[in-house]
Structure formats: C-alpha cells, structure tokens
Image (tube, helix red, strand yellow):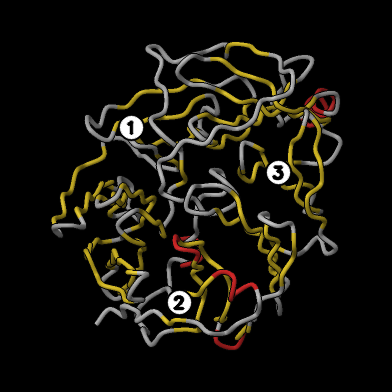
C-alpha cells in the first residue's frame, strides 16, 4: 500500500489541538484573568481579518448538527486509483450510509471540514507527478450534490471557522493562509517573528514562539544557534487577528520542560508537559498539574464535548485504557480489549457525542478493500466509564 490510513484518518491535526475538535460554532474564549503584557504583532493583516465563530481543527471524522461525517479510502495499485468515500453515521440509529464517492488517479486527501449539511474535502490528483492538481469537493449532504472546484495554489487546511479555512504557512513560518468559503479569496494573517506553532482557541489564535535576546541564526551553524537558543525563552501568546493585539500568556526557558497546547475548558487553557510527564492547566500565570503520568511512553488523547470544551484525557497504556474526566476530577478504567493480532480493539474512546454518548472502537469490519477496517459502536458515557460492555454496534458501510 502506498499510503498509511493512520495518517489519512487522524483526527484533528496535532497543530490544531491535541484532542478531537467538535463542529459546534459556539464561541469559547480562553481566560486572560492574570495581568498580561499586551502588544501588537509587528506585522498585521491589512485589512484585518478576524475569525467568524469558533476555530476548529480539520479532521476525517467530524460531528455537526446533522450527523457524524467521516471518510474512508480504497486504493487500486494496478491502476494507481484512489477512491474516497464520504460516509455519514446516524448516531441515533447506529447506521452508516455513503454520501459521495470520489475517484482520482494518484489521489491524496489533505483536509476535511464540515458545516451542518455542507462538507468540503480537499484532495490532490496525480500526487505522484511533478505538477499535481488540487481539488475542493463541496458535498451538500442534504441533497447529495457534489461540486468540484480547482484550488489554484496548494492548500492544506488545518483549521476552519464559519467563514473560512486556514493553513499555517510553514514555508515562511510567518503567516497563516486564510481561504474564504464564499469567494475563495486568499488572504494572510501575519505572525510574530520566530513563531514555531499555532493553535486555534475559541475565536483567537494561541501562538507558540521563541523570544531570544537577538535573532536566532540559521540552525545550520549549530554553535551560534545554540548559543542564542540556550539563552532564549518559549512564549505562548493569545493573538486576535482582527486587531493585531497579542497578549502574553506564559513563558518558560528553552532549557526546561516543553509544553504544547491541548485545548481549553471553561476559559482555562490546558497543556501537555514533558515527553510526556503529565497535563497542566494555566492558572494565574502559572502551570498547575492536573494529571501526572507514571509512564512517559503512555500516549494521551484529549476528547472535547459537543461544545468544544475539553472533557476527557484518555491514556492509552497498551493493554488498558485510563480516562480522566475533567467533570469530576476522577480517573476511570473502562472495559477495553486490545486485539493486537487483528490490529483492532474494542472499547477505545474516539469521540464524545451529543446526548451523553461516546463513540468507541468495536473490533474490525469485513471490508478487505478499505484502508480503514475499524468498526465502531456507541455507548452511554456513564455506562462506559463504569466498565459496561453494553455497546450499540454501528452497522458499518463496507463499500458494497
């Protein structure tokens, strides 16, 4: 196989957030209660372009008010043909149906966003050639219509809001590319020097950058770079693209622990720490540990509720799963079976659904041509946390 489904079906891009992103457009602002320094980014967009509603991460599994949308893929090696399937899961009836089928030579998907009945899927054609073509497929899930529009410049959407999609321009490292949903017009949100990462938080941007006593030299010259870097700080800032205003949130030495943004809850920002050693929250300008990890090799996943607020911290310990619920500050060990011989599992939580449900893995499905063969089920969240195995299996679409 020329592609790995793990890459294809990853939830939100890690740059957007650690946990899955919901599709609710309700705004939720990060807290800035402590005394902050405020500045204006050296370069600001002209005219200023603010966000419209909550920023959420693109993914290949997204929930909107009309259902759960996901994508699967088949690859025909003989003809070098990729077929992408847009699938809707009705979580009330636990059934799936195919909404659209897109066939491309040398195809590769690079982003998906959803607004109620509308799903946009960005794909490349002839990706194995020198000049691949990018397309934006707009699927109206209420009518089944599919519109295909050319994308003039390569665009890998990582976030979206009610009006636009966004991509971090890593080539320059100094701007976010904004593509308007209605006009397809491209504009730019300029960032401070030495920005290394960007995250969406409510309707603002969280910026992670290096603040150094002098500009960092090229890292090709290791000695000079290290001399400056070791005397620098990492800094997190909250950036309003509409005004150019930037508020410092937190800074720490480059020689100390490393933090990455994981999401927010009730206006409080959460960060992963170390490699990893735990999860912290930012309170009164200080990092306060929420959950410690005994094993630094334990992987963690953040799950948001339907309002886009962090709720569960899921720790994958290989043969078991631990869920830390931010609602009550308690840890739970739900029923979980790792079927390593079949590259499948039962009981791993993938997404929190409205109505107090959770979307979990449920073994594998009989769909040999699909790259993703994982089957799913729904369950009441409280029952899941208590260890119940009373799942409602989803009748999966298998491509037939």
| Residue 269 location, quadrant | top right
For the image, the number of numbered tags is: 3
Q: Secondary structure at mark 3?
A: strand
Near-viewer residue (112 or 140): 140
Which residue is label 2 attached to? Answer: 376
- The earlier-in-sequence mark between 2 and 3 is 3
| Residue 338 location, quadrant | bottom right
Looking at the image, residue 281 lies above or below residue 183: below
Which residue is label 1 attached to? Answer: 179
The circle drawn on residue 216 is: none
- The earlier-in-sequence mark between 3 and 1 is 1
Residue 143, image x, y percentages: 13, 57
Residue 397, image x, y percentages: 31, 78
Near-viewer residue (44 or 352): 352
Label 3, label 1: how far apart the Cα atoms are: 29 Å
Task: Say which quadrant the C terminus sits in.
Answer: bottom left
Q: Residue at x 53, y 66 (%)?
A: 350
Q: Residue at x 50, y 59 (%)?
A: 10
Circle 3 crowding by C-alpha within 10 Å: few under 14, some 14–19, many from 20: many
Residue 362, image x, y percentages: 50, 81
Circle 1 crowding by C-alpha within 10 Å: few under 14, some 14–19, many from 20: many
Near-viewer residue (185 or 245): 245
Residue 134, image x, y percentages: 28, 46
Relative placement, left or right, of 105 versus 43 is: left
Label 2, label 1: how far apart the Cα atoms are: 34 Å
Which residue is label 3 attached to? Answer: 271
């Amino acid at each position: 196989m020329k592609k790995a489904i793990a890459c294809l079906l990853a939830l939100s891009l890690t740059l957007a957030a650690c946990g899955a992103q919901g599709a609710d457009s309700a705004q939720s602002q990060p807290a800035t209660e402590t005394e902050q320094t405020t500045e204006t980014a050296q370069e600001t967009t002209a005219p200023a372009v603010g966000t419209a509603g909550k920023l959420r991460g693109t993914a290949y599994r997204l929930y909107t008010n009309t259902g759960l949308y996901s994508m699967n893929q088949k690859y025909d090696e003989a003809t070098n043909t990729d077929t992408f399937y847009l699938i809707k899961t009705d979580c009330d009836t636990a059934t799936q149906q195919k909404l659209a089928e897109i066939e491309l030579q040398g195809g590769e998907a690079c982003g998906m966003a959803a607004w109620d009945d509308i799903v946009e899927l960005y794909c490349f054609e002839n990706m194995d050639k020198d000049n691949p073509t990018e397309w934006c497929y707009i699927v109206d899930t209420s009518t089944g219509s599919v519109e295909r529009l050319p994308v003039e410049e390569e665009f890998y959407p990582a976030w979206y809001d009610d009006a636009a999609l966004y991509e971090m321009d890593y080539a320059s490292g100094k701007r976010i590319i904004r593509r308007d949903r209605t006009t397809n017009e491209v504009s730019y949100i300029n960032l401070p020097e030495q920005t290394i990462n960007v995250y969406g938080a409510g309707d603002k941007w969280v910026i992670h950058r290096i603040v150094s006593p002098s500009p960092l030299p090229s890292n090709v010259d290791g000695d000079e770079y290290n001399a400056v870097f070791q005397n620098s700080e990492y800094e997190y800032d909250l950036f309003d693209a509409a005004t150019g205003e930037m508020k410092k949130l937190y800074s720490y030495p480059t020689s100390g622990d490393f933090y990455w943004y994981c999401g927010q809850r009730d206006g409080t920002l959460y960060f992963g720490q170390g490699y990893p050693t735990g999860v912290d929250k930012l309170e009164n300008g200080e990092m306060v540990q929420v959950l410690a990890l005994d094993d630094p090799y334990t992987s963690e996943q953040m799950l948001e509720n339907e309002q886009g607020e962090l709720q569960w911290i899921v720790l994958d310990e290989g043969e078991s799963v631990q869920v830390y619920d931010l609602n009550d500050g308690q840890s739970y060990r739900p029923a979980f079976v790792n079927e390593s011989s079949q590259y499948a599992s039962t009981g791993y939580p993938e997404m929190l659904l409205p109505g107090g449900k959770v979307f979990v893995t449920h073994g594998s499905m009989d769909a040999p041509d699909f790259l993703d063969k994982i089957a799913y089920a729904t369950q009441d969240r409280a029952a899941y946390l208590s260890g119940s195995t009373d799942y409602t299996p989803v009748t999966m679409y298998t491509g037939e």
